[in-house]
Image: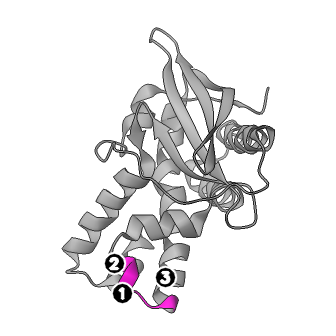
Amino acid sequence: MATDKLIITRRGFGIGLVGGAAALAMPLPAVALTVDQAKTLVGKAVGDVNATINSGKSEKAMFGDFERIFRNYADVPVIARSALGTAARSASAAQLSAFTKAYQGYIARKYGRRFREFIGGEISVTDARAVKSYFEVISMAKLRGEAPFDVRWHVSDKSGKNLFFNIIIEGVNMLASERAEIGALLDKRRGNIDALIEDMKSL
C-alpha cells in the first residue's frame, strides 16, 4: 500500500474540527525545505498512520503509536503553544514544557479514538506549493459515495527539522479549532494552567 494513502471517513475528520476556520498566519520560514521534501514528510506521516490503523491492535494499544507519529512528524511545541493561546505568554518555561508533553498525549488519544471510524476511503497526496514562508502539501480524501474533499498540510523547517505544524480540512484550521477547544478547557479551570495540565493527562 502506498505511503501517501490513509483510510478515513468524512465524519471522522469532522469530529472536533468544527469552528475556528480562519487560517492562522504564522512566521515559519522554510529556509532549506523543498517542495519534494514537504511532500515526502506528509507521505511518510500518512503511511505510518495507515500502518497503525491496519495493525490489528486494540484502540488503546494504538495510542502509543499515534503519539510517536505525532512526535516524529509534527512540530509539537509550535502546535501546543498555539493551542494554549494567550495563556502561553504568562506560562513559565516549566509549565510550557509540561503542557507540551501532556498535549502530545492528549492529541494522540483524541484522534486515536477516532481513527477506527476512518475506514471507508483514502487520502492521496497530490501536490505541494510554497505559501509565503512555508509549504502547503495538498491531498485529496476520496470516499465511497461522496464527493472528494480537500486536506492540506502546512510544513516548515523552523525547528531545524521538516515538520508539519497545521492541517486544513475543507477549510477548517486545526490550529484554530484546537485553540478554541483548549481555551474552553482552560476557562473551565479559571485559567489555572497546572490544573489543565493534570486534567489533560486523563482526557
Looking at the image, is 83 positioned above or below residue 10? Answer: below
* Residue for badge 1: 90
The image position of residue 135, as x and y in percent, is 64, 44
Q: Is residue 125 or residue 119 the one in the foreground?
A: 125
Q: Earlier in the sequence, mark 3 or mark 2?
A: 2
Asked if 7 appears above or below 50 in the picture, the reply is above
Q: Nearer the viewer, residue 30 or 165?
A: 30
Q: Residues within 10 Å of mark 3 (few under 14, many from 20)?
A: many
Question: What's the CA distance linking mark 1 and mark 3?
Answer: 10 Å
Q: Are marks 1 and 3 in contact (CB under 8 Å)?
A: no
Q: Are marks 2 and 1 in contact (CB under 8 Å)?
A: yes
Of tags 1 and 3, the one toward the viewer is 1
Whether residue 89 is in magenta: the answer is yes
Task: Magenta stretch: give its range.
Answer: 87-93
Using residue 28 as the reference point, say whether residue 103 is left or right of it. Answer: left
The amino acid type of the residue labelled 2 equals: Ala
Task: Name the residue furthest front.
Answer: 132
Q: Quadrant of the C terminus?
A: bottom left
Q: Amino acid at mark 1?
A: Ser
Query: As displayed, is residue 170 above or below residue 187?
Result: above
The residue singled out by tag 2 in the image is: 87
> Which SS class for mark 2?
helix
Residue placed under numbered mark 3 in the picture: 96
Q: Pinpoint residue 22: horizontal percent, then vertical percent.
A: 34, 44
Q: Amino acid at mark 3?
A: Leu
Q: Nearer the viewer, residue 2 or 40?
A: 40
